[in-house]
Amino acid sequence: MSVCISGRAIAAVAATMTMAACATTDAPKEILGVACEAPPPLHCPDANCPGQLISNLGNATDPKTGRKFFLDYPCNLKRNDQLTFVLNLHGGGSIGNWQRHYFPIVDLKEKYKLIVATPSGTGPNGGTGGWNPEKDDQHLRNIVDMVYEQFGEKNIKAFWLAGHSLGGQTSNRLINADFYRDRLTGWVSLSGGRLGSRREDVRAQIPSAPGAAPAASRPPSPAPAGAAAPLRLVADASVLPSYSFTHIYSSGEHELTAAGLPANSLWAQKLKCDARVRKADIVDTKAGYVYDSREQPNPNKIWGLKPRPGRAEVFVYGNCENGDLVADIIRMDKGHTEGLEPKVTEEIVKLMMKVK
């Protein structure tokens, strides 16, 4: 039997998660005007994701701003289910639905009871492409407030920030605001800064090349390599926050400097975690969904090539104070823009689920 919510009852029902059963089997439930779908809507095929699909801005609307975003949630919700909420932020020059497939945790929303909100930033000059504090911060807070209100604060057991590249740096900035600090369980940084490490200690320099305009038919994706202006970080990951939370860092092998992954973590030391332990490698036989498919003036492994299967190394600092953990996941023979493979994605979610 399916479960549904009438429009008038949404607020009261969502606050308590006492969802009334429908007599029909084909009436989906709706939250924030979004009918739940499994598999998720506007989903890429396994390869060659159409640009028109990627460019869709979402299935939900922030009524305070009129802006669209993606809301994905489990279709098998039951009363008093304990849910994990992830705010999933894209990188510079990208868009929400690209991020939704770069870090495709929406594929796991039923299995792990995930609520995933994936917005698109306005960028520094309007449109889409980045995260502007003046234009975007309130929109992000609106999304978080709506999700807590509609699904019920008591039912959300964990809140995570996740972000790729500039989205990771933006997450690093947001964790210092009380609005997020009071809720935060952890931060998943997808090549967006490793807590306790300076950028130059973990990120290789992307080879520069003359810029090239992307083909009009290509999906929006992170900005091409070789920007002429010096890099200005949104937040410095080497500056440790004053409170504790779990931190999971993922990177492509080719993004690292010649020294490779640092052998220690200042964040793990601050949280008084156990020594680092290498876990079993993850082997994916399936590629990720997306990559920077625009014509590249200087194709290189650091920026990233086409999606492909692969192997990932996993390092965990466990038994931290307050039940947190710190982890590094390095995707071998990958760069900055190849979308995460399915088993790597699930390993990150499994680590998220371990945090009490």
Image: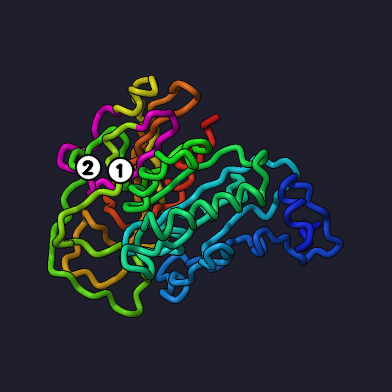
Q: Are marks 2 and 1 in contact (CB under 8 Å)?
A: yes
Residue 193's disc number: 1
Q: Nearer the viewer, residue 231 or 332?
A: 231
Is 229 or 262 nearer to us in this picture? 229
Question: What residue is rendered at 14% in x and 62% in y?
Answer: 228
Screen quadrant of the N terminus:
bottom right
The answer to which quarter of the image holds residue 39 is: bottom right
Secondary structure at numbered mark 2: helix
| Residue type at the position of mark 1 | Gly
**Percent from the top left, x then y, of residue 341?**
41, 52
Residue 229 quadrant: bottom left
- Which SS type dominates the magenta stretch? loop
**Residue 75: which quarter of the image?**
bottom right
Asked if 211 appears above or below 307 in the picture, the reply is below
Q: Position of residue 107 (x, y in %)?
A: 54, 55
Res 107 seen here: no
Q: Where does the magenta region start and end?
A: 241-265
Which disc, if any, is residue 74? Answer: none
Instruction: Judge the density around disc 2: few (<14), some (14-19), many (≥20) Cα neighbours within 10 Å.
Output: some
Task: Give the residue type that dot 2 points to.
Answer: Arg
**Viewer-closest of 10 and 139:** 139
Query: Eyeballing the image, is 105 above or below 274?
Result: below
Horizontal side of 269 relative to 188 (left or right) equals: left
Quadrant of the image for the C terminus?
top right
Residue 306, placed above or below residue 88: below
